[in-house]
């Protein structure tokens, strides 16, 4: 229990936790507008990671349909990250058009939207498998150019390793959070978005094109999802087309922990779960994947509205 | 005829087994509650049967009880499932909306991690060589068939009872039901526990049927498949899970020539069914009763 040990875990927890936060915000945005959980979010996360990989490396794997195809260019990582995120944003829009809009038009049960989004997730994941193959992809070591892999600091006689990946994870996530908060709180479009979340019918009466804003929300949600997919992928590798599903479920624990529909809640929830995973004692490390869900149960028992959630009033 | 049975018999038994799982998802849905825990209890029940069937310490029991050991396995699975379902259901069902779905997903994920770390459950490899109840796998029809009939009978009786009407009232409007004096949390928990218990017993029957049992039996994907049976078959009819399981279990067989793109089509079927057939296959047959 030295200071170095503490700092190291704090660093590990904050960097991964900030990505959880960004990823979970994708759920939160859609939930605050439609009151529905978009189960295709995990698949969009995977798609973002794969798209960025191809844009950055310029090559597909060996056993998909696109095996052996190579792009005529290779983008630097920052641009590839952006490109992958935009493509995932478009995938988010496609998810909305395919799984949510037709049901919304019919005024269908919210349960059906949940299942149709699972259906779209199935399509996306298997499309990725079909195109990119089922093998493990990992970003090459030189993906960040000349950046050193890690910097070592000496704290109280022990070493603390700051990996460049961690700095990038934390930096990009914080940048995204800041941009999102700025957009929602300080722009006209953000104000319209908040109005739509508050009450779609009133918003529509006030001249807000509700369908357009729902589409925009799904684009931003997909953007956040794809970007966090890339960040996790560049840190831990892409363990096949299904790797996003597990993260997608974990991010559900994040939003329940923070409070459904709350943006600060999603951020806090992400950081708490990231830190809890990092500070887990090594002898329990095989239970790491269960930490997020254990916290979810705890919050359901003690404070069901989540850490920062409001107690929803029940309307007839 | 023999050729037909040889070819499709296994498929038929699998449909019965999966329909049981579908029915376990249908029960909480009667009260409008989406639970994905069924698959977790199925996995748990399977582990109970697998451990009891293979653990050396229980060998004398197995020898003396013979075939009766299988019903004992089911009872043990039931005895484990009910208290666990109560403990899981109460905190999640105090709340309205999506919380039960999220809590049950969490339960399935935690169970998966715990099972992988439990030496008794065989870790990632799972448990092999579970003793068979019958020589032929087709004979498992005598396990799943009666249980399915019993479960359908139970649902049929529940639908016509005051309890069932309370569940439907909760499904249609929770607040109104509460105003009418229905103890909504307790009724929701009851429906949830019934579903979990059914899944637990179905799992205990399935472990010998499948011969091996591992963590892959209880994944999130598997629970999505079960949910799809109910919704595609019809979430408002007890025949829905059976019809849905029949369709979705045979679909991969029918679509086999498509190979890799098969699962893509499966997802497409799910989406299209939600959009164009919101009342499921059963909804196509039911008379319009005013929705």
Image (cartoon, coloured by chain):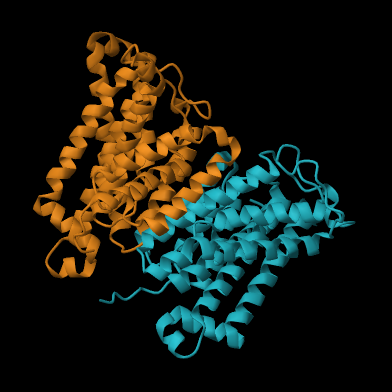
Chain colours: A cyan, B orange
Q: Is residue B159 visible?
A: yes
User: Which residue does the image show at 62% across and 75% down from the upper left?
Assistant: A180
Residue A76, by quadrant, is bottom right
Where is residue B86 shown, x and y percent of the image?
26, 47
Give the camera-side residue of A229 and B252.
B252
Is residue B6 shown above or below A142? above
Say how many tags the image has.
0
| Relative horizontal placement of residue A43, taking residue B31 as reference (left or right) | right
Where is residue A315 shown, x and y percent of the image?
28, 77
User: Which residue does the image show at 26% across and 42% down from the upper left?
Assistant: B83
User: Which residue does the image show at 52% across and 70% down from the upper left?
Assistant: A29
Q: Residue furthest front?
A: B1
Give the camera-side residue of A251 and B262.
B262
Residue B170, by quadrant, is bottom left
| Relative horizontal placement of residue B101, taking residue B80 as reference (left or right) | right
Give the camera-side residue of B115 and A79.
A79
Residue A177, by quadrant, is bottom right
Q: Quadrant of the C terminus of chain A?
A: bottom left
Where is residue A160 shown, x and y percent of the image?
76, 53
User: Which residue does the image show at 82% across and 51% down from the upper left?
Assistant: A58
| Relative horizontal placement of residue A215, taking residue B33 as reference (left or right) | right
């Amino acid at each position: 229990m030295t200071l170095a040990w503490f700092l190291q875990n704090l660093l590990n927890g904050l960097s991964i936790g900030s990505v959880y936060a960004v990823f979970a915000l994708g759920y939160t945005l859609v939930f605050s507008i439609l009151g529905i959980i978009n189960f295709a979010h995990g698949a969009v996360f995977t798609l973002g990671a794969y798209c960025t990989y191809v844009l950055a490396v310029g090559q597909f794997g060996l056993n998909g349909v696109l095996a052996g195809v190579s792009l005529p260019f290779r983008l630097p990582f920052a641009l590839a990250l952006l490109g992958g995120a935009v493509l995932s944003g478009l995938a988010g829009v496609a998810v909305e058009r395919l799984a949510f809009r037709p049901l919304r038009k019919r005024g269908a049960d919210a349960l059906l939207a949940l299942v149709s989004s699972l259906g779209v997730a199935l399509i996306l994941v298997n499309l990725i498998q079909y195109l990119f193959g089922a093998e493990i992809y990992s970003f090459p070591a030189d993906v960040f150019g000349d950046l050193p892999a890690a910097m070592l600091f000496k704290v109280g006689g022990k070493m603390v390793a700051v990996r460049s990946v961690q700095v990038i994870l934390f930096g990009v996530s914080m940048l995204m959070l800041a941009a999102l908060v700025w957009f929602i709180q300080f722009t006209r479009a953000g104000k319209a978005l908040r109005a739509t979340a508050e009450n779609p019918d009133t918003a529509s009466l006030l001249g807000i094109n509700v369908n357009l804003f729902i589409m925009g929300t799904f684009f931003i949600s997909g953007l956040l999802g794809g970007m966090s997919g890339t960040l996790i992928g560049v840190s831990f590798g892409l363990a096949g087309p299904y790797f996003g599903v597990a993260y997608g479920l974990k991010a559900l624990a994040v939003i329940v922990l923070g409070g459904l529909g709350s943006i600060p809640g999603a951020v806090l929830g992400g950081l708490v779960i990231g830190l809890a995973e990092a500070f887990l004692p090594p002898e329990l490390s095989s239970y790491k994947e269960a930490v997020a869900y254990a916290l979810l149960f705890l919050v359901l028992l003690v404070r069901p509205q989540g850490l920062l959630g409001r107690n929803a009033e029940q309307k007839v | 005829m023999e050729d037909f049975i040889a070819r499709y018999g296994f498929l038929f038994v699998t449909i019965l087994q999966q329909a049981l799982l579908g029915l376990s998802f249908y029960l909480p849905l009667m009260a409008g509650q989406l639970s994905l825990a069924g698959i977790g209890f199925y996995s748990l029940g399977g582990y109970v049967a697998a451990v009891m069937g293979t653990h050396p310490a229980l060998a004398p029991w197995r020898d003396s009880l013979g075939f009766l050991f299988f019903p004992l396995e089911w009872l043990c699975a039931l005895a484990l499932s009910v208290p666990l379902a109560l403990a899981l259901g109460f905190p999640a069902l105090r709340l309205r909306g999506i919380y039960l779905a999220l809590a049950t997903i969490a339960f399935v994920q935690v169970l998966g991690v715990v099972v992988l770390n439990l030496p008794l459950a065989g870790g990632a490899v799972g448990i092999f060589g579970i003793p068979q109840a019958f020589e032929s796998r087709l004979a498992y029809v005598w396990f799943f068939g009666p249980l399915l009939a019993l479960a359908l009978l139970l649902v049929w009786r529940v639908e016509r009872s005051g309890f069932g009407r309370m569940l439907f009232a909760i499904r249609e409007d929770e607040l109104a039901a509460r105003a009418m004096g229905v103890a909504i949390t307790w009724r929701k928990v009851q429906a949830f526990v019934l579903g979990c218990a059914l899944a637990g017993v179905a799992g205990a029957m399935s472990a010998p049927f499948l011969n091996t049992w591992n963590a892959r039996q209880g994944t999130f994907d598997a629970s999505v498949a079960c949910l799809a049976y109910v919704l595609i078959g019809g979430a408002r009819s007890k025949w829905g899970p059976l019809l849905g399981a029949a369709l979705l279990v045979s679909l991969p067989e029918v679509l086999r020539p498509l190979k890799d793109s098969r699962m893509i089509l499966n997802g497409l079927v799910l989406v299209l069914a939600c959009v164009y057939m919101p009342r499921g296959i059963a909804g196509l047959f039911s008379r319009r009763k005013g929705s």
